[in-house]
Amino acid sequence: MTDLSLKINKNEFINEMKIIMEYISNSNNKISDYDINSFLCFSSLAIELINNQADFERLSTMILNISDKQKAYIKRESKKFSKFILENKDVLNTIFNNAYNFFTDEIKFELCDKNIFREYNYEEFRDLILNFFNQYKYYNIVERYFDENRIQVGYSNGDYEAIFMNSGITKSGYIMLKENIYNTNLASTLSHELGHAINSNIFLFKRKNNNIFSDPYTEIPSACFETLFNEYIIDNQIDSLGGLILLNKIYSQIKNASTIKMIFPMFDENTMDNSGCVNLEYYNKNNQLILTNKVQFRKSILYGLGYIMSLYFYELNMKDKKEFINSYEDIISKRKKYSLEEIINKLGISLYDFSELKYVKDNIIENNNKLVRRIYG
């Protein structure tokens, strides 16, 4: 009987790992930060898959040898990310402060805990993903990830629901998904990771050196297609309730990100550590430190901006798919050249309206009300 579960091609994966290892071993030139970063992402999975002891030891040694370069890279990129925050401090503070006030004062936000999603067999699941992406010009990339066995379900790696790994050396990538039930939730998660795959295949591989850590817009391509997918299954009545629940999960990302509003007033170039976190210290009346709270500041910025912008991409998509694709490709491919205000303007909205979460608030309220009616009657 044919195994129809999504599993990566182990042999091909190991062959690609060997190509990366050979490239790093034999390269007389400086390896780009992007290739080093990607190599380490690949290595966590490769160590589990490589059975040959000699290859295993060689890979482990390589990881140790390049770890110092990686630390220097992260430190350098952390400074660049801090520079972006400082340049846009007032705007970002306004955006996340308005989001926080909205969720606190204007809406009783319902995050449904009844994860009732439609289930599919393998063929239905694959067709669902392909039919969604068939609306756009990226269908062949998505199809290749299925055909070349670059997706695996049931892979557990800590708290991550999914991981996208890629390499500029092999110009390829893999997607690992924690869940192994073919349902709407898994399809939505996969659409997010395929957004990363599209970004890498079309845009990242065309440039020699890509600084991943410092890119504040790295979640936009993936958040965009995740949001579009959730709307797609609602609009086409494939799983309306599941889609409403998944959209509310997206809104919860914006809600969670909004709590970082407290950090902006005290942010300077030394505030964030090399892991992207900010330590908030709390003192008692005697000025004694009583609590340190580690906040995932960089992650909140990435997902907060990504999901807010994804809703404006949805608006563009509803008006005109061609206009959406043109704006998407322009923003994603040139995002490092544009200022934050320029990117927002290219979404068809002013900086002021974006900061005030125009349309976003109405979208959240409407979806929240629909979900409450569906769940509670």
Image (cartoon, grey):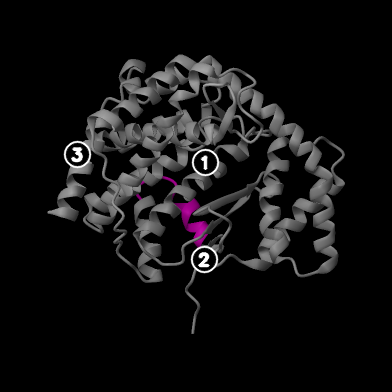
**Where is mark 2, residue-wise?**
154
Residue at the front extreme, as displayed: 286
340 with respect to 97 (left or right): right
Q: Find disc 1 in the rendering and name its residue.
A: 199
Amino acid at the residue labelled 1: Asn
Q: Nearer the viewer, residue 335 or 74?
A: 74
In the image, taking residue 225 as reference, residue 35 lies left or right, namely: right
Asked if residue 17 shows in the view, the reply is yes
- The residue mark sitting in front, 3 or 1, is 3
* Left or right of 51 in this view: 1: left
Counting from the top left corner in percent of width and height, residue 254 is at 38, 35
Mark 3 and mark 1 lie on one chain; the one further toward the N terminus is: 1
Q: Mark 2: few, some, or many residues within 10 Å (few <14, many ≥20)? A: some
| Residue 281 point in image, percent of width and height | 56, 28
Q: Residues within 10 Å of mark 1 (few under 14, many from 20)?
A: many
Q: Is residue 138 in the magenta section? A: yes
Q: Earlier in the sequence, mark 2 or mark 1?
A: 2
| Mark 3, secondary structure of its residue | helix
Q: CA distance from mark 3 to mark 2?
A: 34 Å
In the rendered image of this protein, does residue 304 appear above or below residue 4? above
Looking at the rendered structure, the secondary structure element under dot 2 is loop
Q: Which residue is mark 3?
A: 366
- Residue depicted at x 39% and y 53%: 188
Check disc 3: other Cα within 10 Å, few if <14, some if 14-19, many if 20+: few
Residue at the limit of the structure toward the left, as seen here: 377
Rounded to the nearest angstrom, the CA distance separating label 3 from label 1 is: 31 Å
Q: Amino acid at mark 3?
A: Glu
Q: Earlier in the sequence, mark 3 or mark 2?
A: 2
Q: Main secondary structure of the magenta part?
A: helix
